[in-house]
Amino acid sequence: MQNSKLLDIKNISISFSSEGHENEIIHNISYHLYPNEILGIVGESGSGKSVSSLAILGLLPKKISKITQGSILFNEQDLTAVSQNHFQKIRGNEIAMIFQEPMSSLNPSMTCGKQVLEILLQHTNLSKAEAKVETLALFEKVKLPLPERVYKAYPHEISGGQKQRVMIAMAIACKPKVLIADEPTTALDVTVQKDIILLLKQLQQEEQMSIIFISHDLSLVSEIADRIIVMYKGDIVEQGDVNQVFKSPKHIYTKALINSRPSMNTRLKQLPTIDDFINDTTNSEIITSDMRAQAQKKIYAQKPLLEVINLEKEFVSKSGWFSKPELFKAVNKVSFKLYKGETLGLVGESGCGKSTLSSAILQLDKATAGSILYNGKDITNLSKSEIRKLRKDIQIIFQDPYASLNPRLTVGKAILEPMKVHGIGINDKDRKDKVLDLLVKVGLDETYYNRYPHEFSGGQRQRIGIARAIALEPQFIICDESVSALDISVQAQVLNLLNDLKSQFGFTYIFISHDLAVVKYMANQLIVMNKGEIEELGDADKIYSNPQKTYTKKLIHAIPKGL
């Protein structure tokens, strides 16, 4: 490894002030980045990964935060002592950043091409015509299909993976020496995630730049990084060569991060969490193939709870004022059965029809053809009052619990109101007692009843979403990407909770996710969807160990497996 350090962070501490109190959230950390190197920074929400990287670019919120000690040397110049004007020359030009959520980083009112064009015009001496040629060349470099079309398109007109590629094109436009990628693949499909990782690796080699790759997923980071830093509560707890950290972790937190993710080979009864490792309370009990086979036999001896027969859903798409409307089949001749007490995994890339199918089952969107039998009765032509009764029986837990909770309602009210609508409980006191009991059941406590959604972390909000779904005493719950935005350890807690509730209340789940390792851990049977059709259907373990279709093989091959 080179001796010259491109970036050298020395003894940095960062404090945030709130109501007159100063709270130190980064504690005297030191690390460095060599030229032409990929450095992975791993840790969960609140570990300080993003805050420390924003400090490098001088992007910390001025009024509430400050660097209390230390230096950030870039090419031996201390960035903690430079003016804002000087920072503007560095940002984008010498140090660039790709953010986690491209939709909030891209301007929705400007075409994708114009957004890259502006950066080139600002930082280079290119003419407008030359900048357009360079933008199209960048779009080709980041492997965007039909660069001319993307150039003219607005961000909402392209997919999540394409938006992320536009962000990468913007970041590398001025050939920076350092690229900071902050959770650039978190919400993406496993195949798109793999593509982005390979693209970043390729660009790093071609442009000879250095990358700081930030993620909460250690397996993912091990696929791209040369060295790894592990952060926990504002401290660096471990750092070293990627092989050394991944294969022989020394710190208990690093061990927990590696082991909290569901294994592709063994199915533990309880996934270990960070607290389990710290308190030495991990449960290593395994669900054997025989135990699983016995449970499956019991499930499939019953009549199906839900039967979907030749289901179709068509949408009419128009690409312009005078163009002919085109029919697009989002779901095409889909058939499957779901049994009481089963968890049915549903996987596939964005746009494959997973969410459209769940909307049709929930009667939120009417199917174009086919039938859906629930407890033997076709629910595709129910009256409004019948659909309202059905709502109690079939619930959904959403991907983003914050967006699905009313910010003006306390948590207690948010859970209690649907119970009132559906006539659960004798009176408000009885309902409140049930809500308090539910909060405890989902791993929260009674004091949360009078608090508002913004006062909670992502994992806590997801538990509130689960409490609200089970408050109506449903038979069947659709979990739509309900753990995809959570940290690895919080994800383990929520998956354990869903399995505990399933045992306790006899729930039946359809579990939708782009994280195939999670689906394998949860599912009895698996449906793989592609372009609105079922590509493969069968026992989850058999499909993972011996996929029959090329598309399924591609999905499984793209799962980050670590070293």
Image (cartoon, grey):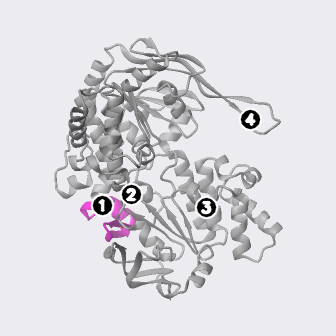
| Circles 1 and 2 in contact, beta carbons < 8 Å | yes
> Disc 1 designates what residue?
254
> Disc 2 designates what residue?
218
- Foreground mark, 2 or 3? 3
> Disc 3 designates what residue?
168
Q: Is residue 52 left or right of residue 433?
A: right
> Disc 4 designates what residue?
318
Foreground residue, 464 or 288?
464
Lower position in the chain sequence, tag 3 or tag 4: 3
Q: Where is residue 409 in the image (x, y as percent from the top left)?
A: 37, 46
Lower position in the chain sequence, tag 2 or tag 4: 2
In the rendered image, residue 420 lying in the magenta stretch gets the answer no
Instruction: Describe the element under mark 4 as helix, strand or loop.
Output: loop
Foreground residue, 449 or 53?
449
Mark-to-mark CA distance, 1 and 4: 51 Å
Amino acid type, residue under disc 1 in the picture: Thr
Q: Position of residue 542 (x, y in %)?
A: 40, 30
Instruction: Describe the element under mark 2 as helix, strand or loop.
Output: helix
Instruction: Describe the element under mark 1 as helix, strand or loop.
Output: helix
- Within-10-Å neighbours for mark 1: few <14, some 14–19, many 20+: many
